Amino acid sequence: MGIPGFGDARTFVLLDHRPGSIFRWLQSLSIPSLAFVVVDPLIVNESYPIESVRRGLAFLDLNEDEDLIVLGICTVPGNSEPPTVNMMAPIGIGIDSRRGAQVVLHDTSFGSRTEFLKPAS
């Protein structure tokens, strides 16, 4: 299915930002100018509901024991504002099948603009 609003971008590669960084790039292979800054939501909140993401991906027919990569799309403003991550609509990708999609978690209190990495004062 892909990412809503980007229907022409259906094939991506996950790239490290730089060694030691929590950020990664989800780079479109069909649209070279399209890349998303992403982060593992478990870094932001250790109790993130990974099983809810798995349930949301049921339409992909992943194996029930297939490991998932779960990613939150980040917004990184260029000013002194802290970055935010969309914890309400994560991207889940089956590691073996390499199929994934962005899903909306309706049964969670997580928001679409969760602040993390507060700026130093």
Image (cartoon, helix red, strand yellow):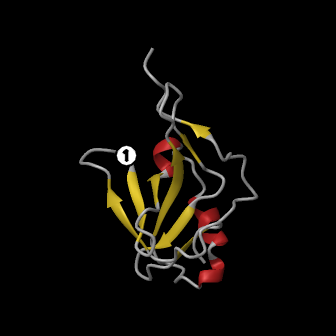
Q: Nearer the viewer, residue 9 or 68?
A: 9
**Is disc 1 surrounded by few (<14), some (14 to 19) or many (20+) residues within 10 Å?**
few
Residue at 39% x, 57% y: name it. 25
Q: Quadrant of residue 62?
A: bottom right
- Residue 82: x and y in percent read 52, 31
Q: Is residue 2 above or below residue 121?
A: below
How many numbered marks are there? 1
Q: Is residue 113 above or below residue 30?
A: above
33 sits left or right of 54 in the view: left
Q: Amino acid at mark 1?
A: Ile
Q: Nearer the viewer, residue 24 or 110?
A: 24
- Residue 17: x and y in percent read 32, 51
Q: Quadrant of residue 5?
A: bottom right
- Residue 113: x and y in percent read 63, 42
- Residue closest to the far right: 106
Numbered disc 1: secondary structure: loop
If the image is split into quadrants, where does the C terminus sit? top left
If the image is split into quadrants, where does the N terminus sit? bottom right
Q: Is residue 94 above or below residue 104?
A: below
- Residue closest to the far top: 121
Residue at 60% x, 56% y: name it. 49
Q: Nearer the viewer, residue 99 or 18?
A: 18
The residue that label 1 is drawn on is 22
